[in-house]
Each structure stands twice: as C-alpha cells, then as structure tokens.
C-alpha cells in the first residue's frame, strides 16, 4: 500500500515538438520517489488535426544519447507485445535531452489507487475482483513470456516490476499491464544494466533474483540477474500482488529475524532502480524468509482454492511454482467460474466494484486523510478528458 506523501504542485504547461508530433504536458499523473514519474499530455500531429491524451514517462536512469537509446529499446520491445491486456507503447519523444516513452494507458486508475481507496473506507477488494485482476495480468504475462523478436527469436522476457503501480484498472473494467521499462530480455542490441543496479520493484521481487546475489551460480556474470531467470519470477511477483489485494495489506510485514541464513549482505553500492519505503536489505530478508508456512498463515482465512493458488505461486523455488503464467491464469479463471457462481466475474463486475469504491471514498471525503500516489483520482475519477479531444489511431 502507498504511504501518504506530498507529491508537489503541477508544473507549468510544457509544449514541445518531437518526431512529427506536438506534445502539451497537462499535469503529472504520478509524481512519487518510489515510482516512475508519469506525465499526462495531449498529442497531435505537428501539421494539425485531432489530439489524444497520452502518458509520457521520462527516462531518468541515463542521460543524453543513452537515455534516448533506452527509450527506443522499450519501444522496440513493445512491438513484440501485442495483447489486449498490455498497455500499448506509441513511441518515444525527446525534448532538451530528456527522453520520454509515449504510452497509451487509456481511461482508468492504477491498481494501487484502487487498493488505497478501499483501505481509506475500511473495505477489502472482493475475492473475485482480486482473482479477476490477477488472471488478466497473468494472461498478459503469458503473452510477454512467449514473445519473439522480428526475426522469430525468443526474447525470454521477464517483466521484473509486476506490482500495483504497473497494473491499470480501466474505467470499463479492463485490466492492463504497463511499463516494461525494467524488463529483462534477450533483445539484440539492448543496453546492459549496470551490475550494481537492481531493476524492477524490490517490494515484489522474486527470491531467485536475490539469491543470485547472495549465492551466485558458477559463471554468473551479473550478480542481480541469475542465469536461469525466467517468467516464473513474474509469477511470484503477481502472487504477492494477489495476496496483497486479498489481505488489504502488504504481506511481507514484518519478519522476526534478520539474515540468519544469508551468507552475504547487500553492500552499500547495490541500489534499487527506485527508492522504497524500506532498505533493500530489509526487503530482501522478508522475501527470502517468506516460505510456505508464512504463506499459509497469511492466507488462512481465504477460501481453500485461493490458498492453494497462492501457495503454489509463492513457492520460494521456481521449479515448485506454476511453470507458466498461463497455468496461473487458468486456475484463477477456474476459481472465477466455480459452479456456485451464477455468472463468472468479469470486466462488467470489476467496473461496478471499482466505481462503488471510489464513489464511497469520494462521498466520505477521505482524500485529505489518505492521499494516493496517483494524482487526479479522488474525489472524482481521473480527469482524462480535455475539451476538443478526440481518440484516434495513429
């Protein structure tokens, strides 16, 4: 769950031209040290015509040419990720040496905002809603894990940053996985990640990534990228997100012991791609000590089918987990279509539940008491409409 924070005021509107398009930044959508900065912008052809709303993500890890290359790498990767549950990347833009990834996230909210809204009114997301979101994300991951490049070569892609701020809940109940900027892949010509940088979201990291540093394999060149890293790491991350949705709290709080069986501690030069509320060492300890017994205790009040799903998704060793995200998706959909359900839970039901939560939070005026990370969410849904705007395909 997010923590209350002051994300500052909106910057003055910035307009610039790049790649044949005119961009006009309206306001920040996300401005928080723990997450990628996202800017809400209009975009139209420089020669004129209708405009649409897009999201710009500045590339902050590098500067100048390397930042532009990193942005283009994400654009290239997106061409292999055509799926209804993956937010499209429209291209890249550059202004004053700042490179941006241009994304089309559509009308909606991030899952974290929805989880925060539920907490603010002392409610939990329904079991069906949580299972539906996780199933849709698993479907997107299954596509990503099987993706190939333009020549038909497997990319062996791993998202590495599956978390509530990379999952979008559309106003129509559609679920989208966003932001593959931290993904590991075997895309030819990709920029190597610095060896002391932990890519992705440390709060939802899979244990094998941490063990790759603590107990590296022979001939492992990157201490934070194990040789056998694959999509099962994303299965673990999604399992944590599912458990958090069901519990209405972050499931790894707190352990009783620290680093009793870890031979090496994180040296000070190892840093996360993003800041986090807890030190990397603390997060690593909690992940590495979150075994089957801890999962069962956390999930003890949940229905038996969900306990079984969580127990398998969150196995410490990847060989004991679901071997594909598609397997996780299928079991979640089986839960949603269980015989006692008159109708399987889907986008229509998700839309109704999300809208009811935000309406209740708005009516109780909880925004000041519990600010959310995503701006423009409460007391009304996101202001994703501008006068004269017109959605169109580029």
Image (spheres, helix red, strand yellow):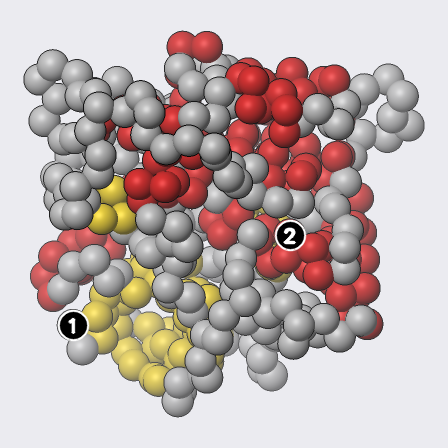
Few, some or many residues within 10 Å of mark 1 (<14, 14–19, 20+)? few
**Residue 299 sits in quarter:** top right
Residue where numbered disc 1 is placed: 97
Q: Earlier in the sequence, mark 1 or mark 2?
A: 1
Q: Residue 285: in sight, yes or no?
A: yes
Give SS at disc 2.
helix
Question: Quick check: 231 left or right of 137?
Answer: left
Question: Quick check: 212 left or right of 122?
Answer: left
Question: Quick check: 192 left or right of 125?
Answer: left
Q: Residue at x 49, y 20 (%)?
A: 291
**In the foreground, 355 or 238:** 238
**Residue 302 sits in quarter:** top right
Residue 12: x percent and y percent? 39, 89
Q: Residue at x 22, y 48 (%)?
A: 271
**In the foreground, 169 or 228:** 228
70, above or below 3, in the image: above
Q: Residue 53: in sight, yes or no?
A: no
**In the foreground, 338 or 272:** 272
Q: Residue at x 46, y 84 (%)?
A: 9
Residue where numbered disc 2 is placed: 115
Question: Quick check: 321 left or right of 280?
Answer: right
Locate the C terminus and report the quarter of the image it occupies.
bottom left
């Amino acid at each position: 769950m997010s923590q209350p924070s002051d994300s500052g005021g909106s910057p003055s509107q910035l307009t610039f031209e790049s790649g044949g398009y005119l961009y006009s930044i309206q306001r920040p959508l996300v401005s928080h040290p723990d997450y990628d900065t996202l800017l809400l912008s209009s975009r139209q052809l420089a020669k004129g015509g209708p405009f649409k709303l897009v999201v710009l993500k500045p590339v902050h890890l590098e500067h100048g040419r390397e930042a532009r290359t990193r942005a283009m790498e994400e654009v290239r990767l997106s061409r292999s990720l055509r799926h209804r549950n993956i937010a499209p990347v429209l291209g890249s833009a550059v202004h004053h040496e700042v490179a941006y990834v241009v994304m089309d996230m559509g009308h909606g909210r991030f899952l974290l905002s929805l989880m925060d809204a539920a907490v603010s009114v002392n409610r939990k997301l329904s079991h069906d809603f949580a299972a539906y979101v996780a199933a849709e994300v698993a479907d997107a991951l299954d596509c990503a894990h099987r993706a190939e490049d333009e020549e038909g070569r497997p990319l062996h892609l791993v998202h590495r940053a599956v978390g509530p701020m990379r999952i979008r809940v559309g106003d129509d109940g559609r679920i989208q996985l966003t932001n593959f900027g931290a993904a590991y892949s075997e895309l030819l010509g990709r920029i190597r990640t610095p060896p002391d940088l932990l890519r992705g979201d440390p709060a939802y990291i899979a244990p094998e990534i941490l063990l790759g540093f603590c107990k590296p394999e022979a001939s492992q060149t990157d201490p934070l990228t194990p040789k056998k890293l694959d999509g099962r790491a994303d299965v673990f991350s999604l399992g944590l997100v599912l458990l958090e949705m069901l519990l209405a709290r972050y499931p790894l709080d707190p352990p009783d012991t620290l680093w009793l069986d870890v031979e090496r501690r994180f040296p000070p030069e190892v840093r996360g791609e993003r800041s986090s509320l807890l030190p990397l060492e603390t997060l690593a300890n909690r992940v590495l000590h979150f075994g089957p017994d801890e999962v069962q205790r956390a999930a003890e009040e949940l229905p038996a089918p969900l306990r079984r799903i969580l127990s398998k998704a969150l196995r410490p060793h990847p060989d004991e987990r679901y071997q594909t995200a598609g397997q996780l998706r299928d079991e979640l959909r089986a839960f949603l279509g269980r015989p006692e359900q008159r109708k399987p839970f889907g986008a229509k039901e998700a839309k109704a539940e999300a809208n009811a939560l935000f309406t209740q939070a708005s009516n109780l005026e909880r925004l000041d008491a519990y600010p959310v990370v995503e701006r423009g969410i409460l007391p009304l849904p996101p202001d994703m409409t501008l006068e004269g705007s017109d959605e169109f395909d580029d």
